[in-house]
Image (spheres, rainbow, N blue to C red):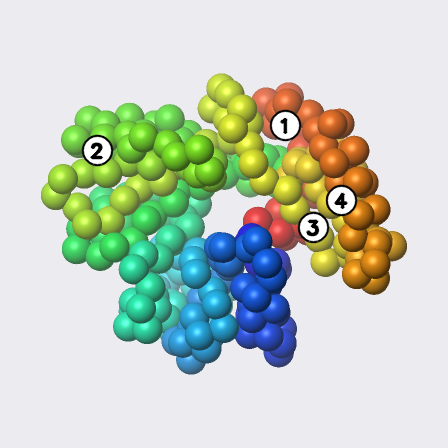
Amino acid sequence: MRITGGEPSLRKDFTDIIHTVASTKGIRKVATTTNGYRMEKQVADWKEAGLTHINVSVDSLDPRMFHQITGENKFTQVMGGIDRAFEVGYEQVKVNVVLMKDLNAHELPAFLNWIKDRPIQLRFIELMQTGEMDELFQRHHVSGVAIRNQLIANGWLLKVRDHNDGPAQVFVHPDYQGEIGLIMPYEKDFCESCNRLRVSATGKLHLCLFGDHGVELRDLLQQDSQESALIERIQEQLQTKSVSHFLHDGNSGMTPHLASIGG
């Protein structure tokens, strides 16, 4: 299970939520996606509460570019948070990066050098076109295929997928401790192995990040006695899940921007 946002660590009860989820029968993995601003001070508490995996968003290794992209001058705190995660016992940290033309795309060699001796899985997420960012997409989009071709040309090898792996194509290199994960939503058959469902903060089930609607669950999340009805509704709606998104057609569904539903 992944706890995401917005920024989940903004909640004062975030550590309690982690503990509740981790204590739930049947849940073996509890992950979060965070901007990393609070990790240095809080990650030890998160781990003790039961958080097993962390994804941190770091779109630049240049503090000035980091500030330009994020709007926050927090680069030093985020780097300190990643170091602190390793100190408290995490064996790997995943770092999410969106490479964008004319902004940070030239930093690919620097990112690779950064993980040469660090157990970090860099996840290069291809910029996606949503309803409110057509112009930005056209100006800054970098093809995931182009990044993959660079990796292969430099000796990176595709790792065999496990049955429960997420959407990333993972590459390894004998000279690097870190790994590279490529998330390429425009790749043919990207959705074929999709195993993701999302429940929003408003209690709606989203079968696809780019779906046309959400399924109301809030009325069945109020009481434990409604568990069987909740399972039945989810199973029923799963039968309607589309085989693919329609990003290739310029259709991002009801998602105006990714922050509106979470990553």
Position of residue 217 in the picture relative to residue 17 (left or right): right
Q: Which residue is mark 3?
A: 199
* Residue 94 location (% of width, % of height): 38, 53
Cα distance, mark 4 to mark 2? Answer: 42 Å
Residue sitting at the far left: 175
Q: Residue at x 83, y 62 (%)?
A: 223
147 relative to 215, above or below: above
Q: What numbered label is drawn on residue 245?
A: 1
Q: Amino acid at mark 1?
A: His
Cα distance, mark 4 to mark 3? Answer: 13 Å
Does the image show residue 228?
A: yes
Going from N to C along the chain, the mark reached first, 4 or 2, is 2
Name the element at disc 1. loop
Name the element at disc 2. loop
Q: Which residue is mark 2?
A: 156
Q: Residues within 10 Å of mark 4 (few under 14, many from 20)?
A: few
Q: Which residue is mark 4?
A: 231
Going from N to C along the chain, the mark reached first, 4 or 3, is 3
**Foreground of the two, 154 or 132:** 154
Residue 175, by quadrant, is top left
Q: Amino acid at mark 3?
A: Val
Q: Amino acid at mark 4?
A: Ile
